[in-house]
Amino acid sequence: MAEPAPLTACPPWLLEHWQAIFQRHEQGKLPHALLFTGAQGLGKRRFVRFVAESLLCLNCSPATGACGSCDSCAQLTAGAHPEFSTLMPEGASMNIKVDSIRELVNWLQLSAPPGRYRAALIDQADAMNRNAANSLLKTLEEPGERALLILSADRPGDLPATVRSRCQSTVLNVADKSAAINWLAEQGVAGAEDQLAYSRVGPYALLEQSTDVWQESEQRLQKAWKDLFLMRASVGKIVDSLSDLPVRRSLGQFSHWTLLATKMGQNLSVGADHATSELISEVHTGLDSEQWFSLYDRIQQLYRSDSASFKSQTVLEGLFADIRLMTQG
Ligand SMILES: [Zn+2]
């Protein structure tokens, strides 16, 4: 049996989203498959767990979700709820495999006790490979009685349209801004209001980004990006300066800056903090508008690639060498 674990709390800025679900639950109009998407660091994983726990609870409320004291809540905190199952990406490839989905689908067909749900969570459902997604389709079409499938995805575009169209999708956002600002301030994040206004990520990611380690790496990435476009150092040196950062982190940041450069090229508002705006205006004349767009596509592709070579610094080397060629051409 698993260790006792407390029930999951709803991230306060997402409470309105729960209240909308609660209402449908009360009206008996809850669809059997729910898909939640939204920015990174918004608390999707916590939220879907909170929703599942709350809907399994025999006495849930719009204000706080699960009651914490009914039979179902006791089973959840004991980590032994017979009507609850979760699935998330695993292994080196961080995929959700077809066998795991098949198992889940069979489990979901079993009947739930009268008046109760049987709930399955799939975290980061966009990590399902094609076969896994296909195995899920049957359940999405003919769900068991009172079966509830709750999915979260960072990149819903990576889910097959056949899966997406069978789920009711909700794009989560910071519905309650002041709740998020208060929470960030309580965690000691300075300038929470500005950060939230300019950021493309959610409060949890903002908290992570406020750490010294993150700030230091951010400055290093800014320097690398500038050095690259302003020809201040060799490609090899620039790659070396980022060697201890996860490639995914570097690519994520470059993808964001490239997107901002395409905006600047179209005279659109960049919508970034002062340091970022300055960085973008310093480098953006290095490429023409078309080149920025194609660079953005390329970095996005690299970022989304799940091949093993993705983790290697050679990805950055190739990318930087090509950018150099473009800026010199
Ligand atoms: Zn309860």
Image: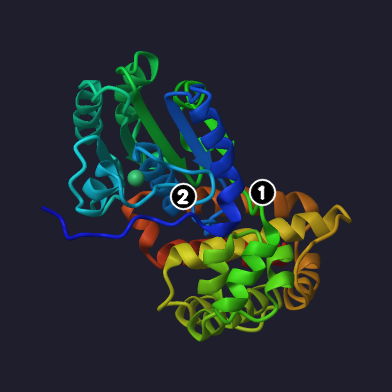
Q: Residues within 10 Å of mark 2 (few under 14, many from 20)?
A: many
- Element type at mark 1: helix
> Where 143 falls versus 267 (above or below)?
above
* Sequence-first tag of 1 and 2: 2
Q: Which residue is mark 2?
A: 47
Q: Residues within 10 Å of mark 1 (few under 14, many from 20)?
A: few
Q: Which residue is mark 1?
A: 294
- Element type at mark 2: helix
- 269 vs 107, nearest the viewer: 107
- Amino acid marked by disc 2: Phe
- 230 vs 131, nearest the viewer: 131
Distance CA(mark 1)–CA(mark 2): 35 Å
Q: Residue lying at the far top in this picture: please name it.
A: 142
| Percent of width and height locating residue 6 | 31, 60
Numbered disc in front, either 1 or 2: 2
- Amino acid marked by disc 1: Ser
| Percent of width and height locating residue 234 | 56, 80
Q: Is residue 321 visible?
A: no
Q: Residue lying at the far right in this picture: please name it.
A: 267
Which quadrant of the rendered structure holds the C terminus? bottom right
> Where 283 falls versus 85 (above or below)?
below
Residue at mark 1: C-beta within 8 A of ligand 1: no
Say whether residue 277 is left or right of residue 209.
Answer: right
Name the quadrant containing residue 138: top left
